[in-house]
Amino acid sequence: MKLNHVANKTLLVDVKNLVRVERESTLQILFHLKEIDRRKLFSDLKYPSLFSYCVKELGYSESAAQRRIVAARLIGKMPQIVPKIEKGSLSLSNISAVINATKNPEEQKFFLQEVEGLSRRECDHKIFELTGKEKEVKETKERVAADKMKVAIVLKDETIMLIDHLKAMLGENDMDEILKFAMTAGIEKVEKEKFKQTKGRNSPPPADVKRYVSVAVKREVYLRDKKCTHCGGTYRLEFDHRKPFALGGLSSIENIRLLCFHCNQRARIRAGLVNPKGSRKRDHYETSVTKGSPSG
């Protein structure tokens, strides 16, 4: 686009109007993302999360996607921030900084008022004044070879001591080998404790035995599926009835599957087990594999 023929005054007026339109469009995007998140529609496209959908389907950078998701979810809880976003006095980056700084809703309201109209650097200074906490340093990754990545993370002293202790026990100095050992041991522990990958005796079923998913069934389902059977994700996996228990589904190996949290939520919505406002119907029961509890 060539603008060298546009008069100075017109150019300044046009860009101001474009910024207004941009803010209005951003707000509309936030409302759309909020509703997509409520309906878990990204699951229909086989994305394990709203974040993955925003990055891979909509083409946002990871940081841009995160800012929009945080703001989209917040406007449902605090609709009073909508006009502030629209007029530009409250930026998405400052909203994200506040939400990262505190999980307390009342503090969030106060902090958002305090950072209104501030630049991101001024916002960081203000949050430090309010909390006394240093800005969180995020993990960075950089590929250095076809099969290797350079990762920079911030660890607590206690974690460093554990790594050093494991290093001494193994007599190993290669950090990749040390972390691989620790992660493998951690995965095995989770599989045994949370995914029931042990050969010990099954725990007795609860009173509501029809709704109960036995340890044996959980073990076989996990070995068979290993990941979400809809989107392929491995985060927050849950045991789910293919035919919902509320609709007569059995707690059998054939009827139990692994779904990630979001795909499970979307499956409930599509089965009519969640009312239009998003709350669960009272006759429906659902479990998380991480709790090892009854499923539904």
Image (cartoon, helix red, strand yellow):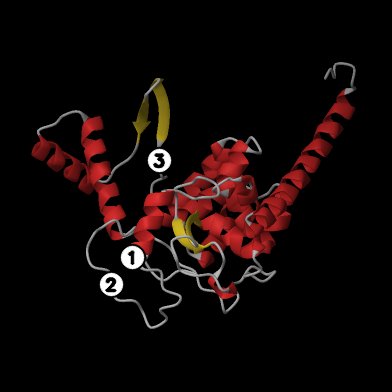
Front-lying residue, 54 or 116 = 54
Residue at point 13% right, 42% down? 165
Q: Is residue 33 above or below residue 203?
A: above
- Give percent across and percent down for residue 149: 37, 27
Q: Which mark is residue 203?
A: 2
Q: Residues within 10 Å of mark 2 (few under 14, many from 20)?
A: few
Q: Answer with mark 3 or mark 1, whichever residue precedes in sequence.
A: 3
Q: Is residue 182 left or right of residue 35?
A: left
Q: Nearer the viewer, mark 3 or mark 1?
A: 1
Secondary structure at badge 1 equals: helix
**Dot 3 alpha-carbon crowd within 10 angstroms: few under 14, some 14 to 19, many 20 or more:** few
Q: Is residue 70 something one can see in this rendering?
A: yes
Where disc 2 sits, the SS reads loop
Q: Residue at x 63, y 49 (%)?
A: 42
> Does dot 3 land on a helix, a strand or a loop?
loop
Q: CA distance from mark 3 to mark 1?
A: 41 Å
Residue of label 3? 137
Q: Toward which corner of the image does residue 216 lie, by quadrant?
A: bottom left
Residue type beneath disc 3: Val
Hey, what amino acid is under mark 2?
A: Ser
Taking depth in this image into account, of 279 and 78 the one nearest to the observer is: 279
Query: Which residue is identified by label 1?
Result: 215
Q: Counting residues from the N terminus, which is met first, the one under dot 3 or under dot 2?
A: 3
Snapshot quadrant of residue 52: top right
Q: Earlier in the sequence, mark 2 or mark 1?
A: 2
**Residue 65 pos. (x, y %):** 59, 42
